Amino acid sequence: MSRKVDAVTVEIVGNLLLSIAEEMGIAIIKSAYSTNIKERRDISTAVFDPEGNMVAQAEHVPMHLGSLLSIIQEVYKKYSIEQIKPGDMFIGNDPYNGGGTHLPDITIVAPVFVENKLIGWVANLAHHSDVGGKVPGSTSGDAVSIFQEGIKIPISRVCQNDQANEDVLGFIMANSRIPGERYGDLQAQIAANRVGMRRLLEAYDRYGDLLVDSMYELQDYAERRLRAGITKLVDGDYIFTDYMDDAGVASPNPIPISVKISICGDTMDLDFAGTNVQVEGPINVTYNGLLATVFYCLKALIDPGIPSNAGIYRAFNIIVEPGLIINAQNPAPVGARIDTCMRVADVIFGAMAPAVPERAIAGCNSSCTTAVFSGNDPKDKDHFFVYLETIAGGAGANRYADGLNGVQVHLTNTSNLPVEALEMEFPLVVVRQYSLVTDSGGAGKFRGGQGICREFEARFDNVSYTGLGDRQIFPPWGLAGGKEGTGGAYYLTRTDGTIEKLTSKCTGIILNTGDVVKIHTPGAGGYGDPHERDPQAVLEDVIENKVSVEKALELYGVKVEPFGSTYRLAE
């Protein structure tokens, strides 16, 4: 379609739309009630064209793109354009009918009108710490149906004439263990959309119809740019397989994730034949989640500067049978779907490593290692607490540098909850240790990033713990001769001294006063021959407790000896 809009205007408008999405994100973070949003920033925000195609997404959590991807299309399926009015907002979270990817991610979208002309949409998503379900925190390691994972919210009008529908909000609150927190977070989401609507109207006042024309051109530009990047790659087939540890007690066997990426000219096909069928466990992924994962991977590997919008989807084709674990069908549980998306990212990065060696990285921790503690404070039995944390790990090394230590990778980008904030907000546990794990980064010319150790001690009896993770059996792989990183682990130490290694997906473990849960997150793979690493870098790793003296000699061939209060290279 020919549009009268110049490239400079498109670039300016594109950055303006991105700034609108970013301001919406700040509004949620500054006004939310729950620590998962105001501290850990588990949100996403975006702007859409009038047809519901994304034109700008703030850089928060890539996984959330799957939840934002088609919710406006779902609104159009339920409401005609004549039924959508200024002052409306719509809410949904159902992965099978509302465009989401798991139930805790609640999305609210709002149309933006100039008089009676629809000029676009704004949307935001927030991960709510409890939306009902069989366990506090909603996601359980033993779920076999989505109906065990919380309330399903069909597409509903949550605001009309710019007034919140208290009946809809009340229904959601009634299905959460912490209704006051839900109400505050939902109001923050509504307020953030109002910020976005106001800013989009200001943009239209300045640019008029060029604003909407630029939205369409931005998508065309993203497609052209990705196709140009694909054209630079060597034609051929690129294949990789990796494994999930398991899907919980009902599906205890390893789960293969496979991809064949075929490149021909400016087109790319991703065929996931050979991937496991959907399972009785919470790690299934809907098609939207798979799309979001591929979107992220191709942007990261081919051209990170491509604008994040719907035009990217036009440049690749996904081949995946319905009923696979990455194209799950209702009512498969999807609460921990991000761990599977992480593995999809790893197989795409692994397959593409020969094609884009300058951007390839070794296997990452690639597990959204989750800890959920819940219970009552004996001094305030009417107050129920749900503390949810995802703990970072190692990032894979590349041909230029060591991997980062203790970071979130790929599909998640949340912050850690500071210990001070945790212990002020949640009286259930205290943190006894927070450190990097020695020797967890895979050896290489460039070392893989380190995992994290975090120890929680229960302050009261009857505190419930749920742990969700992966990469505890199949560790992160190395590249170009680099060694694998270590896997993760959960340990429970009772007050009588007994130590139990918990499974990677454990649910409702009851802790009593003084019991300690120790969480080790996975490290990451190294890059290149470890014996090519600069001995001085190995010495610095030993001094900083990143590598032990023993592993320095065993893996790197570097002998280090004590020297006063520190170490030196042995002569």
Image (cartoon, rainbow, N blue to C red):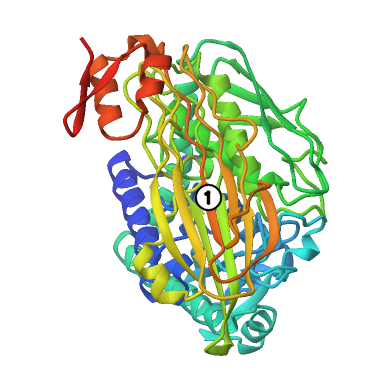
Q: Identify whether 309 is placed above or below 86.
A: above
Q: Is residue 94 left or right of residue 201?
A: right
Q: Identify whether 249 is placed above or below 150.
A: above
Q: For the residue carrying disc 1, how many other residues have a C-alpha within 10 Å: few (<14), some (14-19), or many (20+)?
A: many
Q: Is residue 440 left or right of residue 157?
A: left
Amino acid at the residue labelled 1 = Ile
Quadrant of residue 443 in the image? top left
Residue lying at 47% horizontally and 12% vertically, measured from the top left: 481
Q: Nearer the viewer, residue 545 or 166?
A: 545
Q: In this figure, which residue is indicated by the disc labeled 1?
A: 519
Quadrant into which the C terminus falls:
top left
Tell me where residue 498 appears, x and y as whole percent: 62, 54
Q: Nearer the viewer, residue 361 or 504?
A: 504
| Residue 124 visible in the displayed image | no
Q: Identify whether 518 is placed above or below 326.
A: below
| Residue 344 visible in the displayed image | yes
Q: How many marks?
A: 1
Q: Identify whether 59 is placed above or below 438.
A: below
Q: Is residue 501 left or right of residue 323?
A: left
Tell me where residue 397 appears, x and y as whole percent: 40, 26
Residue lying at 38% horizontally and 30% vertically, measured from the top left: 403
Q: Nearer the viewer, residue 327 or 7?
A: 327
Tell me where residue 147 appears, x and y as whole percent: 80, 64
Residue lying at 58% horizontally and 20% vertically, measured from the top left: 351
Report helix, strand or loop for mark 1.
Answer: strand
Given the current orientation, which residue lies at the most extreme front position?
496
Tell me where residue 135 appears, x and y as whole percent: 70, 68
